[in-house]
Amino acid sequence: MSVLKYENIQWSVPTLFFDDSFAIAYADVLESLNVPNPIKYVYGMVSSQWSGGRNATIKLQDKDIIVKVIKELTKRGLTPAFTFSNKIINQEVLENEYCNWLLDVGVENNCQFIIVSDKLFYHIKSRYPEAKCVSSVIQPMALPELAKDVQKEIDFYNERLDRYDRVVVRPDFSIDLLEHKDKISDISRIEVLVNQTCRKNCPGYCYSVISKSENINSEINTKIKCAVEMYTREHGSADFCRTQSIMHTEELIRNLMDIGVIDFKVQGRHYQKTYCRQIINDHLLKDIGTSLLVKDKVTDYANKLDQTNYLYSNNFMDKNFVLIQRKRNV
Amino acid sequence: MPQIRYKNVSWNLPFLFINPELLDLYFHVFQNYEVENPIKKIYGQIDNPWSACFLNLKYSKKELEQYFNYIKAKNICPVLNFSCYDIPNSKLKDEICNYLLDLIENQNGEVILSSDKLFKYIKKTHPNIKCVASEIKSVFELKKGKEAKYYNELLKKFDRVILSPSYVKTTFLNDIEKYNDVSKFEVIINNNCIIDCPNEKNHQKVLCELTKSNYKKHKIFECSKNSLSLNKIIKNSTLLETEEVDNLVNNVGIKHLTFKEEYCSIPLRFFSSLIQYTYISNGNTQLLCRDVANSLFSKGVL
């Protein structure tokens, strides 16, 4: 009996340069059990001028370590996906030497690039036409008008599918995806984010911030008005679940699988590492039964890798990991 | 909204005597999300001569009284685990144990027992207390192939009977027709042991011994799983899979489920697992877990 919650899903998980030990543990433990690894992509990025999305936990820029991590992951069949999701890219930023070095290393090791900015997309394609690019979830999230017009949103994704290798859709769009599946040009290249904790059609205050790079410890980060918090404060958690939640149920995920979606994504690198591991485990492995043994084994294995400095030495950790000063709620 | 996984099932959860803050936290999450609270009974134990444990958890009489008042206010049934199999006559009069019986009787609580001697004693001194046969009893008494006869005898004496996890995992379903009433059976759904573990009896003996002396003097028992590969442990595990629990509840008629106290020391792991067992997997259960994690984080225990 399989311990996997879903067969034939390719998961994208937020462990790159955040909790690489956990991704390695998954690969090694499942291989020892002769169970196919449900993790296909590991996403994230070190801090850089091209980086966006959630806060990077690795600050800088030890090239040897970055290459080592990428090689440890790729040799286990995992594909690193760099979150180059800074929305605001100018010519000077495009030419940034360190970012272009990251691109070189990424392409060399068959990594993928999750992108928001068209400028960056065309820059990458001009340097490496074969580079695999993913349209970030931030692209549709940053265009609130899409939520008001289904056809417009479908056109948006089809246009992205023409250019990108994979396209992450707004989590709110999943239900529409079931209804309009035939209008999507290639559903097998659509990726669905299953655990977005936002409210329905969130006005996206935070996405306007997190799509900008280098926001670690910035003042602005502490001033984000979260639409979920505001709603929950006024109406309560129960009402939020009933009317506003876009968390994907198991049934919705299975329905999406039935129409041909194979790439699914969980978020969580803005949480505590322990809780992020829990989220990944709970989405990838069955809730009940012997899967519990696998969850424990993977977690123990990852902890051992951390304790033995398998990827990073203590010295490296001290120097390079950012201490997030603000209270980092899970 | 998170939906309860098994309606009409009485869950017995390991919250008795653990940090009241954790139980409060669990109740708080239910209230916040307006979901049905699956907790009907909570079980547990403290260090005493009638329990097979080495918790190093001791309460004074006054503390016990306060604690039971706290449980009473929550309107849940306390179930005391007095599952030491070998209890000397001299220990039957133990003051704290008898005081615990008084408290349990006052609250219509229950006791989980292995020892027939203790069963007779309690029936004589506190006849109103409901008695549940522990799965540990079967470790010492059950003979392979004679399960139905054995459990039918226990059903005559006890108010409820906790089945051997190995039996549930292997041949219980073949014996269903031999039982008139399976509704008095209780099934442990997350027993993290292997089927017919050869060390089980020794393990329980050691636990009983520990209650009689200072546990620090004893070497902690080496678990037989330690020498097995994960693959072998999975193949021989007594953990029940979703389909097995679904069948036991929906088709066989099991009404009582026990969630074992694994991972109590890792609160997030414990709560997450508990929520997954008690609720149908649903995106919103992650929100429940997130609130629990936030609370644990703010208490500094994550």
Image: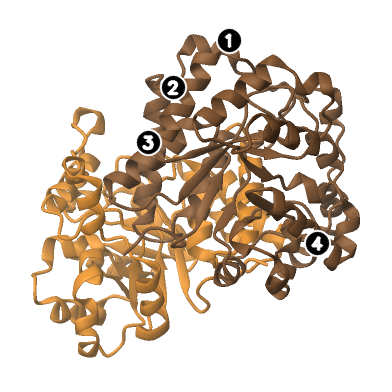
| Element type where label 3 sits in the image | helix
Closest to the camera, between mark 2 and mark 1, is 2
Q: Which residue is at the front of the view, A169 or B105? A: A169
Chain B shade: orange
Choose the circle earlier in sequence order: 4 or 2: 4
Disc 3 sits on a residue from what chain?
A
Callout 4 secondary element: helix
Residue on which disc 2 sits? A311
The residue at 48%/47% (across/down) is A40
Q: Choose top left, top right, bottom left or bottom right for residue B265.
A: top left
The amino acid pointed to by label 1 is Lys
Q: Name the quadrant of the C terminus of chain B.
A: top right
Of the residues under marks 3 and 1, which one precedes in the sequence?
A: 3
Q: Mark 1 highlights which residue?
A: A319
* N-terminal label among 3 and 2: 3
Q: Amino acid at mark 4?
A: Asp
Residue A101: image location, x then y, percent: 62, 19
Alpha-carbon span between mark 1 and mark 4: 46 Å
Q: Is residue B239 above or below residue A129?
A: below
Q: Is residue B64 left or right of residue B75?
A: left
Q: CA distance from mark 3 to mark 1?
A: 25 Å
Is tag 4's residue or tag 3's residue first in the polypeptide sequence?
Answer: 4
Residue at the disc numbered 3: A300
Confirm whether circles 1 and 4 share one chain: yes
| Residue B158, horizontal then vertical, whole percent | 28, 75
